[in-house]
Image (cartoon, rainbow, N blue to C red):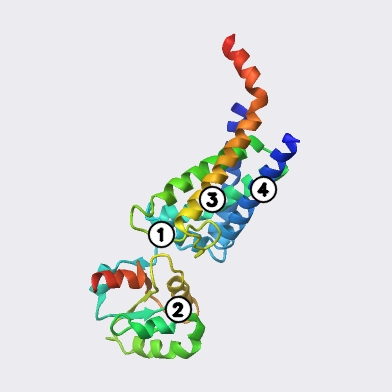
Amino acid sequence: MRRALRQVVAILLLAILPAIAAGLWHPRRPAWQSDEVTLAVASAWVPDVVWVDARPDADFARAHIPGAVPLNEDRWNDLLPALLDQWEAGSGKSPRKIVVYCSSLSCQTSHDVARRLREEAGMPNVFVLQGGWEAWRREHP
Amino acid sequence: MNCLVQRILAAAVGLIFLVSGLIKAMNPAAFAIDIQNYRLLPWTWGVLLALYLPWVEILCAGALLLRIAYRGALAIAAVLLGTFIIAYGSTRPRGLDIACGCFGHGVHRGYWPLLIGDALLLGLVLWLIQRDLAPLAPVIRNTVAD
């Protein structure tokens, strides 16, 4: 039994080394601060916020947050200019916040779009709406 | 024969952990989001787990496949599976419909199939532990009797 315990400790300790390395150098390491915001927080930013709908075109056409700009990875290059126009048309004092949403809590596309906006478009203040479109629908049935 | 079956099943468990661990280790950012979706831990703890857990799984898998630190690896596998079953089991009563994050982000196998699958896997791991400890039973009995 004592040997098993030693083995458990050895495995758990050994795993710390690659975990530290991943935290320092992994190209897809997570940020230490969450990029998610609740609907209440994001709504308080209006009008200095641009809503970005990362769902497929058909879902966007059916319904979306008023004023939202569609931007999905299928038509990234076609849709990005419209977002940039809307973003630059803000108040001008400080860059407007961007809040990306997809369908629900478990969808990944909003995080992917937010990451690309930060990394490829160099946009600051990009956030993901917690709960996505479902959260919005709950508050605005 | 029994021993061969044990070895094959242990290797199968090892392979499952290896694939699961490698997928998560390749994208810890996505795994951190999966952990966040459970709404059980603050983000920072989720980040730490996302960086650490995949490597525990990979090392466990290596230990099971190579039969090095075998008993310890089985114990960790049982605890990981038990913890996961409790965590994922709690999602539906809390009104969450999320991907489990077991084999990469966004893979949604359904609530009950996933829980049943993991319960079976946990049962297998517990059986392997019991088989591994079986030869020690007489020794333990004698020690207790003395």
In the rendered structure, are the residues bearing label 3 and label 4 in contact, judged by CB atoms less than 8 Å apart?
no
In the rendered structure, are the residues bearing label 4 and label 1 in contact, judged by CB atoms less than 8 Å apart?
no
The mark lying in front, picked from 2 and 1, is: 1
Secondary structure state at the residue bearing disc 1: helix
Estimate how packed mark 2 is, as few (under 14), some (14 to 19) or many (20 or more) residues with alpha carbons within 10 Å. some
In the rendered structure, are the residues bearing label 2 and label 1 in contact, judged by CB atoms less than 8 Å apart?
no
| Amino acid under disc 2 | Leu
Q: Chain of mark 2?
A: A
Total tally of numbered discs in the picture: 4
Same-subunit check for callouts 3 and 4: yes
- Residue B67: image x %, image y %? 71, 40
User: On residue B37, which mark appears?
Assistant: 1
| Amino acid under disc 1 | Asn
In the rendered structure, are the residues bearing label 2 and label 3 in contact, judged by CB atoms less than 8 Å apart?
no
Task: Please give the name of the residue rendered at 61% of the width and 50% of the height, measured from the top-left corner.
Answer: B17
Q: Can residue B109 be seen in this snapshot? A: yes
Q: Which residue is nearer to you in this view: B61 or A42?
A: B61
Which quarter of the rendering shows the C terminus of chain A?
A: bottom left
User: On residue B12, which mark appears?
Assistant: 4
Same-subunit check for callouts 4 and 2: no
Q: Chain of mark 3?
A: B
The mark lying in front, picked from 4 and 1, is: 4
Disc on the earlier residue, 1 or 3: 1
Q: Which residue is nearer to you in this view: A36 or A97?
A: A36
